[in-house]
């Protein structure tokens, strides 16, 4: 394990080292999702053997996981409740939904996190983003979906716990250890799903305390940026609020893995995935790869998109 000092200077240096601006074109907004070629989709389809379909979405409800300040939980309001007097006795119900785009299971677009006034592919924030939305790197850049081979990296099960401890940082060495124990290889263009157990714990407890669920969440170490780029991962998702550990490992930096991966390396993050059922099935089948179908809601100009990810084994 590295003993190098992690601070904002290291983050900027690592971001420059791993930067992939222009790799997929000057106007690209998909980043590493471009690795999901037609052949990689066909390879993913070939993993389907059982026809078993599993949703990886957590409940979209008003009780969590957000603090309802800054980010707001999904709130359903019925605007029609079937009390109409219409020809032939016809009646109907209609509803509306108010929520933050990052209020439950969702993908971050590459316009979501940035630093020094510049986002993915060198777009300046001042020229691309305002209260109406973003003109660069919107979630609609990958409206055709996130479809490919998903690989579950079940860190919590590997360590023999239901949920990792608060502030636990999963390093790249541990990711390799888990994959080896699962006899699973990560291929270029794979979508990595990392299980910490945190969303599962919160759903079981019916509680999303701000101090722990959000501010002290276990997750990936900033040192995993190199691992994600080196393995040409198409996207990474986790069952926590931010993919990365939310207590920053780098002095003077906030969300350093977001900074490097989203702004410099072009890696889309999936957050608040519920991996509990998938983990049980993968363990029973002794197989941790599957077809993942997870298109975001294509809201024009949005920097994130709610999603109901589907794993098909």
Image (cartoon, helix red, strand yellow):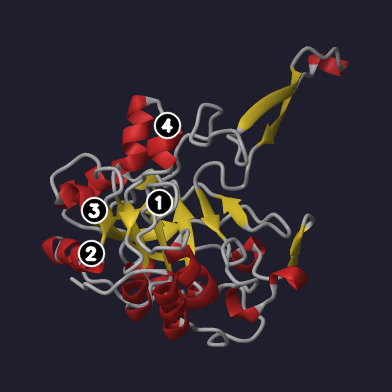
Precedes in sequence: disc 3 or disc 4: 3
Q: Which mark is residue 177?
A: none
Q: CA distance from mark 1 to mark 2?
A: 18 Å
Query: Which residue bears the numbered disc 3?
Result: 154
In the displayed structure, 179 sits above or below 101; it is below
Q: Which mark is residue 175?
A: 2
| Nearer to me, 198 or 232 | 198
Query: Which residue bears the numbered disc 4?
Result: 209
Which SS class for mark 1? loop
Q: CA distance from mark 3 to mark 2?
A: 9 Å
Which SS class for mark 3? strand
Precedes in sequence: disc 3 or disc 2: 3
198 displayed left or right of 110: left
Residue occupying image coordinates x 50% and y 63%: 146
Q: CA distance from mark 3 to mark 1?
A: 19 Å
Badge 4 density bin: few <14, some 14–19, many ≥20, Cα 10 Å: some
Precedes in sequence: disc 3 or disc 1: 3
Circle 3 or circle 1, nearest the eye: 1
Circle 3 or circle 4, nearest the eye: 4
In the displayed structure, 282 sits above or below 42; it is above
Query: Which residue bears the numbered disc 1?
Result: 246
Which SS class for mark 2? helix
Badge 2 density bin: few <14, some 14–19, many ≥20, Cα 10 Å: some
Name the spot of residue 309 as percent of width and height, x first. 46, 50
């Amino acid at each position: 394990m590295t003993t190098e000092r992690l601070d904002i200077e290291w983050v900027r240096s690592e971001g420059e080292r791993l930067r992939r601006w222009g790799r997929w074109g000057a106007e690209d907004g998909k980043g590493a999702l471009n690795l999901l070629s037609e052949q990689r989709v066909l390879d993913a389809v070939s993993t389907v053997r059982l026809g078993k379909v599993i949703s990886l979405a957590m409940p979209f409800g008003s009780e969590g996981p957000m603090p309802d300040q800054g980010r707001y939980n999904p709130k359903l309001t019925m605007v029609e409740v079937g009390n109409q007097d219409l020809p032939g006795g016809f009646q109907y119900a209609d509803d509306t939904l108010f929520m933050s785009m990052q209020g439950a299971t969702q993908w971050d677009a590459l316009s979501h996190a940035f630093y020094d006034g510049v986002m993915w592919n060198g777009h300046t924030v001042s020229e691309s983003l305002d209260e109406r939305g973003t003109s660069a790197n919107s979630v609609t850049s990958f409206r055709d979906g996130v479809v490919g081979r998903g690989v579950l990296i079940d860190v919590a099960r590997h360590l023999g716990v239901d949920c990792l401890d608060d502030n636990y940082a999963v390093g790249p060495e541990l990711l390799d250890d888990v994959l080896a124990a699962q006899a699973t290889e990560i291929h270029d263009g794979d979508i990595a799903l990392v299980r910490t157990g945190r969303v599962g714990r919160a759903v079981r407890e019916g509680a999303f305390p701000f101090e722990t669920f959000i501010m002290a969440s276990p997750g990936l170490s900033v040192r995993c940026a190199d691992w994600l780029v080196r393995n040409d991962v198409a996207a990474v998702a986790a069952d926590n609020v931010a993919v990365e550990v939310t207590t920053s490992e780098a002095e003077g930096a906030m969300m350093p893995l977001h900074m490097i991966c989203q702004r410099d390396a072009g890696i889309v993050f999936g957050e608040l995935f519920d991996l509990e059922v998938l983990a049980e099935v993968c363990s029973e089948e002794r197989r941790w790869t599957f077809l993942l179908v997870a298109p975001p809601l294509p809201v024009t100009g949005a920097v994130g998109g709610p999603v109901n990810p589907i794993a098909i084994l």
